Image (spheres, rainbow, N blue to C red):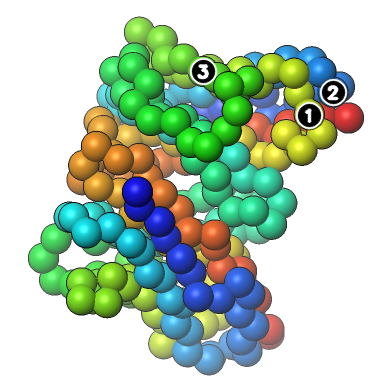
Amino acid sequence: AQSVSQHNHHVILSEAASLELGCNYSYGGTVNLFWYVQYPGQHLQLLLKYFSGDPLVKGIKGFEAEFIKSKFSFNLRKPSVQWSDTAEYFCAVSSRGQNFVFGPGTRLSVLP
Amino acid sequence: EAGVTQSPTHLIKTRGQQATLRCSPISGHTSVYWYQQALGLGLQFLLWYDEGEERNRGNFPPRFSGRQFPNYSSELNVNALELEDSALYLCASSLQGSAGNTIYFGEGSWLTVV
């Protein structure tokens, strides 16, 4: 069975700081990887996704993530966070015949 | 184009009652997923329906059940409600089975059990 872990439960940063949120998954086959974001009071939105090709994928709002197959990781990065990035971030994995599995989420608080 | 729509937005039930939540997927999507988001517990997978069939089920008791209709809309039923069933129930849809597709979420239905 697939599982997803996220390294941090809660991250607190000041504006303009760099962000890296860790995500690891356990599944030996071909996977699709996602990051979703849930802004306060809003529904879950897709931030970025990886299906194949270039392991460095760019998403909305300046976010990017790198798929490192050997490490089963898909870490999310942003060079300079803004107060509006305050949200909960979920890493997810899917594969053929399997449902989407989400990590426990990382709450990001950006201080103005 | 309309996104995933869920109803009701909020529902208050007493312990022991039954709750029914509804979901309409994005037009053209045949897969529907249900997740429970309880406070501090992240997204817990409940059920996955594709083309009217239940494809997978999460680690929840049998009193959590659902179905998918011929128009691909879906219903989640929770019987014999318990206080810990209070949560946000999220529905998501995708074009087909999960491989290679993105799922899109609705805004959720808040269920409060008192």
Q: Earlier in the sequence, mark 3 or mark 2?
A: 2
Query: Disc 1 vs disc 3: which is toward the camera?
Result: 1
Mark 1 residue element: loop
Mark 3 residue element: strand
Q: Chain of mark 1?
A: B
Q: Position of residue A15 (x, y in %)?
A: 59, 87
Residue to which mark 3 is pinned: B66
Q: Chain of mark 2?
A: B
Q: Position of residue B57 (x, y in %)?
A: 44, 31
Q: Earlier in the sequence, mark 1 or mark 2?
A: 2
Q: Residue extending furthest left?
A: A53
Q: Amino acid at mark 3?
A: Gly
Residue to which mark 2 is pinned: B15
* Quadrant into which the C terminus of chain A falls: bottom right
Q: Residue at x 81, y 18 (%)?
A: B16
Label 2 near label 3: C-beta < 8 Å? no
Mark 2 closeness class: few <14, some 14–19, many ≥20 residues within 10 Å: some
Label 3 near label 1: C-beta < 8 Å? no
Q: From mark 3 to mark 2, how far is it between C-alphas?
A: 19 Å
Q: Chain of mark 3?
A: B
Label 2 near label 1: C-beta < 8 Å? yes
Q: Is residue B15 above or below residue B93?
A: above
Q: Mark on residue B82?
A: 1
Q: Is residue A39 visible?
A: yes
Q: Image quadrant of residue B114?
A: top right
Q: Nearer the viewer, residue B55 or B112?
A: B55
Q: Amino acid at mark 1?
A: Glu
Q: From mark 1 to mark 3, how far is it between C-alphas?
A: 17 Å
